[in-house]
Structure formats: C-alpha cells, structure tokens
C-alpha cells in the first residue's frame, strides 16, 4: 500500500514540480524538447538493450541454463523503457539507470533478496 502512495502521489507531484521549475528556468520549448528527446532516445536505447537481453535469454533457455540474471535484466530493461516513455525528469533518470548494465548489476542483489523472501513466505511458488 505504501508503494502505491509513492507511485501515484509523490512521484507525479515531484515530476510536476520539477517540470514547472524547468519550464520557468529553461523555458517552455527547451523543456518540451528535452522531454521529447529523452522519450525518443530512451525508446531507441530500450529497444536495442531489450533485443540484446532477449537474445541472451533465448540462448540460455536453448542451452537449458537457468535464465536468472538474463530474466532480471530483461524485466529491468522493460521497466526502464516504460519509465523513459513517461514525461518527467525523475522517471527518465531511473529509466536510464535501468537500461545500463552497471546500475542493474548494483540493483540485482536486492531483486534476488526480494525474490527469495517472497519464495520463503510462500508468495512465489516454484513448481
């Protein structure tokens, strides 16, 4: 529940305040240009990274390896691409971080810990 409050109230409010400040400081057209450039550039980068992650995932599945990190990378890239399509500077920053391998490598242990915790609680079941 607390994540929903953060996702639907705090983040959009911060995004709106930052966009208003940017519009006041840089001007309307530069702010709109930045939003469009990050959206289009981010979508292209997400497509490129997504295809790379998809081929890695397919290669692992074809060779009967566990998808593990390739699956987590694919999900992170997908979420990063969605965040880049949303207008705003905060979502763009988080989206770009999820698209690059270095930040994903730092986030991955937290995702592993979260998945193991859910598996131990019985929320996620492995057949």
Image (tube, rainbow, N blue to C red):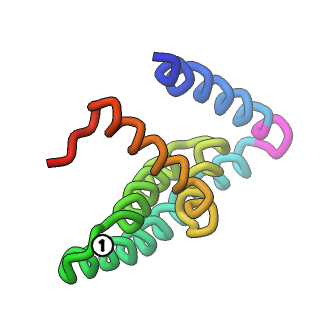
Q: Is residue 4 left or right of residue 70?
A: right
Quadrant location of residue 76? bottom left
- Residue at point 65%, 51% (across, down): 93
Q: Find disc 1 in the rendering and name its residue.
A: 57
Quadrant location of residue 49? bottom left
Is the N terminus in the top left, top right, bottom left or bottom right quadrant? top left
- Residue at point 35%, 74% (across, down): 51
- Residue at point 36%, 63% (across, down): 68
Residue that sits furthest to the right in the current view: 25
Residue situated in front as seen by the camera: 126 or 80: 126
- Expressed as whole percent of the image width and height from the top left, the position of residue 5 reads 52, 18
- State whether the magenta stretch is mostly helix, strand or loop: helix
Determine whether 39 is above or below 14 in the image. Answer: below
Q: Is residue 38 left or right of residue 23?
A: left
Magenta-drawn segment? 22-27
Residue situated in front as seen by the camera: 28 or 44: 44
- Expressed as whole percent of the image width and height from the top left, the position of residue 16 reads 65, 29
Determine whether 89 is above or below 73 in the image. Answer: above
Residue situated in front as seen by the camera: 76 or 19: 76
In reply to whether residue 40 is colored magenta, the answer given is: no
Q: Is residue 18 left or right of residue 115?
A: right
Q: Is residue 124 left or right of residue 80?
A: left
- Expressed as whole percent of the image width and height from the top left, the position of residue 28 reads 72, 42
Residue 38 visible? The answer is no
Provide the secondary structure element on which disc 1 rests: helix
- Residue at point 65%, 42% (across, down): 90
Say few, some or many: other residues with alpha carbon within 10 Å of mark 1 (under 14 / 14 to 19 / 20 or more).
Answer: many
């Amino acid at each position: 529940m607390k994540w929903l409050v953060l996702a639907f109230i705090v983040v959009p409010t911060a995004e709106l305040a930052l966009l208003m400040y940017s519009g006041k400081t840089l001007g309307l057209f530069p702010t709109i240009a930045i939003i469009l450039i990050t959206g289009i550039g981010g979508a292209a980068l997400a497509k490129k990274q997504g295809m790379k992650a998809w081929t890695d995932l397919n290669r692992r599945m074809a060779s009967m390896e566990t998808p593990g990190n390739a699956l987590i990378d694919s999900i992170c890239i997908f979420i990063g691409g969605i965040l880049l399509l949303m207008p705003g500077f905060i979502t763009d920053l988080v989206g770009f971080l999820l698209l690059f391998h270095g930040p994903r490598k730092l986030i991955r242990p937290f995702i592993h810990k979260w998945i193991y915790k859910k598996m131990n609680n019985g929320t996620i079941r492995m057949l």
